[in-house]
Amino acid sequence: MIPKPIVKRSVELRELINQYNYRYYVLDDPSVPDAEYDRLLTELVALEKNYPELVTPDSPAQRVGAKPLDAFGEVKHVIPMLSLANAFNEDEMEVFDRRVRERLNIDVVEYAAETKLDGLAISLLYENGILTRGATRGDGTTGEDVTLNVRTIKAIPLRLMGNYPDFIEVRGEVYMSKQGFSDLNKAQKVKGEKLFANPRNAAAGSLRQLDPHITAQRPLLFFAHGIGQYEKAALPGIHIEILKKLRQWGLPVSPKTKKITGIKQCHEYYQMIGECRASLAYQIDGVVFKVNDLAQQELLGFVSRAPRWAIAYKYPPEEEITKVIDIEVQVGRTGALTPVARLEPVFVGGVTVTNATLHNEDEVRM
Ligand code: IVH
């Protein structure tokens, strides 16, 4: 028998930790210093170690712990995970809006406007409020079972809060902040391990580790941007309202998400996000507009692998100007020579660039 005060304390600790997590990752409004959070977590880990009968799969002390896998299992997506059509300029954006209006036979469209995070798409299954499966998108039909890795991401709740459906698949993006990416690369360099090219690669590489202990050490974050399958639940018929529900259940949703009306507001949103893009904590490569009304989404349907009710309006890649200080020639192991430019340090796309290889002569000539 476990002493009653111990049981009580473990329940209390789980609730506190989950609450602090919610304040930190969902509300972006931390309520305790990190040290206090760590102290409570350490206390819970110790309790569960001394009294293994206390352990519940959704305990925040059980995020890591599993042994490395030999390979990932396969997950079939009952509802395919699609991609988005792109618009690269105002004209293409207007063509999209006109098609939507014509097909729906309406004058103005209400959209959900979101940022397009540069991460990787993930599907999270919650059964009776408990996270039971995490899967990558893969080819859209079949993904990889990355449940053990997903469980290590603190921004992803192991248990939902409030009035959630019995069965629901949440979809969103796993990503790394610019700061997290730069810290990770610094640590990789110190350890003599390979550097990641950008936050997207770093997030993908971190999530596709067979050893969840490695994933646990990577600064991965998550934003929900939609749902997949669900059962026996009356959910709102409006995309933005669904996102609000997700947030109530404890899932982080981008605070930039906004309801807008008509093409003019699409341009304004694109402009507004474009202006604050460089100061966001994470990389985005565009904004996404989704027809807000689910009944209208259904009328519009799909073409090939993309919905007709959504579009990604892309930004040009971030560019900066700097000075070449010197050009050195590197000799590779095979004797290959590569000219490398030493640059005046410049901050672009969330990283400080000091060197650039000049092997790609065509691009250099431009
Ligand atoms: S919605 C059917 N919303 O972009 C709608 N996707 O090219 C499919 N992405 O695989 C996704 N931010 O990984 C959606 N706010 C957002 C997104 C977003 C990033 C990614 C996602 C998807 C890809 C589509």
Image (cartoon, rainbow, N blue to C red):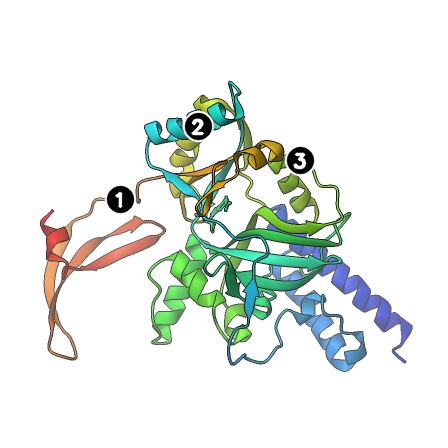
Pair 3/1: label in front: 3
Is residue 261 visible in this depiction of the protein? yes
Residue placed at 87% from the left, 78% from the top? 2
Tell me how far mark 3 sits from mark 1, CA to CA: 40 Å
Secondary structure beneath label 3: loop
What amino acid type is highlighted by mark number 3? Gly
Instruction: Say which quadrant the N terminus sits in.
Output: bottom right
Percent across and percent down for residue 87 are: 36, 36
Q: Which of the 4 quarters of the picture holds residue 50?
A: bottom right
Please tell me which residue is depicted at 56% across the width and 40% down the height of the picture: 255
Q: Mark number for residue 319?
A: 1
| Mark 3 or 2, closer to the camera | 2
Closer-to-camera residue (224/227) = 227
Name the residue: 89% across, 76% down. 3
Q: Distance between the residues labelled 2 and 1?
A: 32 Å
Q: Is residue 325 depicted above or below 246 in this figure?
A: below
- Residue 65 in the image, given as x and y percentages of width and height: 62, 76
